[in-house]
Amino acid sequence: MVRRMMMSESRRNRRKAERNKRIYKNNISRKDKIIGVLAIIIVFLIAAIAAYYYSLSKAGLKLF
């Protein structure tokens, strides 16, 4: 008969606690993530358009 060595309960709880420490809770909702990504995209587009118009105005073109 094969005899198995069982982990003591305190050791088992300690190992479980170590595993749970590595799990990071993400409390950001899906809606907030979507709003954040859209805000980043809008800021990028505004910066790209501003750079484009700035380069055209430096080239001597009248834009408005």
Image (cartoon, rainbow, N blue to C red):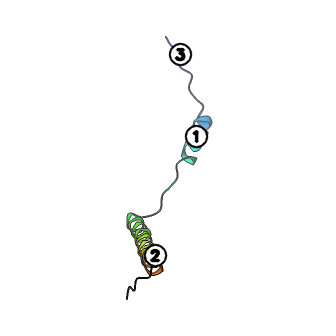
The amino acid at mark 2 is Ser
Residue 56 location (% of width, % of height):
42, 78
Depicted 59 relative to depicted 37: above or below: below
Residue picked out by circle 3: 3
Q: Could you say whether the residue bearing mark 1 is in a helix, strand or loop?
A: helix
Q: Could you say whether the residue bearing mark 3 is in a helix, strand or loop?
A: loop
Mark positioned earlier in the residue sequence (2 or 1): 1
Q: Nearer the viewer, mark 3 or mark 2?
A: 2
Mark positioned earlier in the residue sequence (3 or 1): 3
Residue 23 location (% of width, % of height):
52, 48
Label for residue 23? Answer: none
Residue 32, quarter of picture:
bottom left
Mark positioned earlier in the residue sequence (3 or 2): 3
In this view, the residue in front, 32 or 53, is: 53
Residue picked out by circle 1: 13
Residue picked out by circle 2: 55
